[in-house]
Image (tube, rainbow, N blue to C red):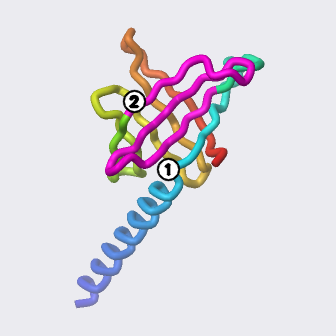
């Protein structure tokens, strides 16, 4: 009987941890994120922003590249939320993933390029 109670306690503990992580990701997701340049990738006057909005049961992700504060390129795609793991957005019909780090208030944008190479960019939430 003690083993059963201990096993139930462990199961509830895991479930509560999962629910907290899921809630943290869902509540952090909508907003604006600024790209953090890597140490060898910094170019003055060039910025990239990522905006995530709820769009029905999907999410609309908009990536805007700015040069000298002027929008030069904008891409928009729909994504669906994947609840397993730590929570992430998966592009519908594409190869982009937004993986959330709720502790650091950031996300990683993973993208498969046309040449088959995977790129990963870091964005931090700027609300």
Residue extending farthest to the bottom is 1
Which is the main secondary structure of the residues drawn in magenta?
strand
Q: Which residue is mark 2?
A: 96
Does residue 3 sit above or below 10 in this rendering?
below
User: Residue 42: percent from the left, percent from the top?
Assistant: 72, 20
Q: Is residue 14 magenta?
A: no
Split into 4 quadrants, where in the image is the N terminus?
A: bottom left
What's the CA distance linking mark 1 and mark 2? 16 Å
Mark 1 element type: loop
Q: Position of residue 96 (x, y in %)?
A: 39, 29
Tag 1 near tag 2, CB within 8 Å: no
Crowding near the residue tagged with mark 1, few <14, some 14–19, many ≥20 C-alpha atoms within 10 Å: many
Is 103 positioned to the left or the right of 88 in the image?
A: right
Say left or right for 13 vs 7.
right
Residue in the image at 61% along x and 49% along y: 104
Residue at (51, 27) in percent of width and height: 120
- Figure disc tally: 2
Q: In terms of image quadrants, where is residue 21? A: bottom left
Position of residue 87 measured from the top left corner of the image (x, y, whole percent): 40, 50
Q: Which residue is mark 1?
A: 29
22 over 52 or under it: above or below? below
* Residue drawn at (51%, 49%) of the image: 30
Secondary element at image label 2: strand
């Amino acid at each position: 009987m003690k083993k059963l109670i201990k096993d139930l306690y462990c199961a509830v503990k895991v479930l509560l941890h999962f629910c907290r992580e899921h809630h943290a990701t869902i509540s952090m997701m909508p907003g604006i994120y600024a790209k953090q340049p890597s140490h060898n990738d910094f170019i003055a006057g060039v910025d990239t922003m990522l905006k995530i909005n709820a769009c029905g049961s999907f999410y609309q992700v908009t990536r805007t590249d700015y040069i000298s504060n002027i929008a030069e390129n904008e891409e928009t795609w729909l994504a669906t939320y994947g609840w397993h793991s730590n929570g992430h957005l998966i592009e519908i019909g594409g190869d982009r993933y937004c993986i959330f780090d709720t502790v650091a208030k950031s996300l990683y944008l993973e993208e498969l390029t046309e040449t088959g190479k995977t790129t990963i960019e870091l964005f931090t939430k700027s609300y």
